[in-house]
Image (cartoon, helix red, strand yellow):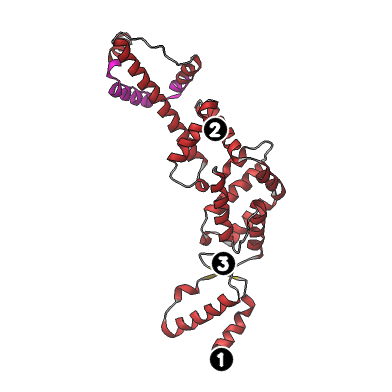
């Protein structure tokens, strides 16, 4: 009992300054008492050693927790780990990834870096959040804390996501009409394996390109069906605009020789009736 009292006296100064490893929950009086009991069990019996894993908290960590609570209006947050999961819930409820805030009007590089930092925080585990990273993350976010608060409070994530979808057209040549927007969003949500809080911009962009390829495939199938109906004496007008034809020609020009060969081979496999046309142009080559 004397030994326990001595250790308890020594550890009194660390109440609220030590954190549970893994959960990031601060160790208060009752938890510190349990830790001391576990410590003596470990010394005497070699048990409960895993319960002794702790880490020091810092003033920067406490400030980072408060900053995140203010930005996302979080309640009942006791640790950085709590803040991470509550931000993930916040993103999930809104249904769109946090990176879309980078597409708001009049946003600067410092704000974009802060948004990327918040994404890194919610993807990290407690053990990955070292003192150095916490200090770096806090500095990045606090530099634009006021602007971020206004941005997150004012902007609609869905509107920003649609704006991002529209921006893909100039980068990837993917054409998305206003009528197709909801279909694209539904396709992405159905085909992304990760939950929305973990969506990475590049991976979502790939899903948009997959949607575009599937749309093209369906049009080719429709053309094939139209050819079959025409051969039976029925003629149906095609609904492909000049803009769409121009767009697909531009995409073909950007393909490599290997990609074009693969596409052509796949077309022959799926639509054998085009062989005669291909042979005609091969003879002219």
Q: Which circle's residue, 1 or 3, is located before the other in the chain?
A: 1
Q: Secondary structure at mark 3?
A: loop
- Residue placed under numbered mark 3 in the picture: 25
Q: Residues within 10 Å of mark 3 (few under 14, many from 20)?
A: many
The x and y percentages for residue 20 are 54, 69
Which residue is pictured at 58% across the width and 40% down the height?
A: 100
The residue that mark 1 highlights is 2
Q: Which residues are magenta?
A: 250-273
Image height of 14 relative to 72, above or below: below
Mark 3 or 2 closer to N-term?
A: 3
- Quadrant of residue 6 within the rendered picture: bottom right
Q: Nearer the viewer, mark 1 or mark 3?
A: 3
Looking at this view, is 223 or 277 the one in front? Answer: 223
Quarter of the rendering occupied by the C terminus: top left
Which residue is drawn at the image coordinates 65% and 63% (left, top)? Answer: 62
Identity of the residue drawn at 62% across and 37% down: 103
Is residue 255 rendered magenta in the image? yes
Find disc 2 in the rendering and name its residue: 165
């Amino acid at each position: 009992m004397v030994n326990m009292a001595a250790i308890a006296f020594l550890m009194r100064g660390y109440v609220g300054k030590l954190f549970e490893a893994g959960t990031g929950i601060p160790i208060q009086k009752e938890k510190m008492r349990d830790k001391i009991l576990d410590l003596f069990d470990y010394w005497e019996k070699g048990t409960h050693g895993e319960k002794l894993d702790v880490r020091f908290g810092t003033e920067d960590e406490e400030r980072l927790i408060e900053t995140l609570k203010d930005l996302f209006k979080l309640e009942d947050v006791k640790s950085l780990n709590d803040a991470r999961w509550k931000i993930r819930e916040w993103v999930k409820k809104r249904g769109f990834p946090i990176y879309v805030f980078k597409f708001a009007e009049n946003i600067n590089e410092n704000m974009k870096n802060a948004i990327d930092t918040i994404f890194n925080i919610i993807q990290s585990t407690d053990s990955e959040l070292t003192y150095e990273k916490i200090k770096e993350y806090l500095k990045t976010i606090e530099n634009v804390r006021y602007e971020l608060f206004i941005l997150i409070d004012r902007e609609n994530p869905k509107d920003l996501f649609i704006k991002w979808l529209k921006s893909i057209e100039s980068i990837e040549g993917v054409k998305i009409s206003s009528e197709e927007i909801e279909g694209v969003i539904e396709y992405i949500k159905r085909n992304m394996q990760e939950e929305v809080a973990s969506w990475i911009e590049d991976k979502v962009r790939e899903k948009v390109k997959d949607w575009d390829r599937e749309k093209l495939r369906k049009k080719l199938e429709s053309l094939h069906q139209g050819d079959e109906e025409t051969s039976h004496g029925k003629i149906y007008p095609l609904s492909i605009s000049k803009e769409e034809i121009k767009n697909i020609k531009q995409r073909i020009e950007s393909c490599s020789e290997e990609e074009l060969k693969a596409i052509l081979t796949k077309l022959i496999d799926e639509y054998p009736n085009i062989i005669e046309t291909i042979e005609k142009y091969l003879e002219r080559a």
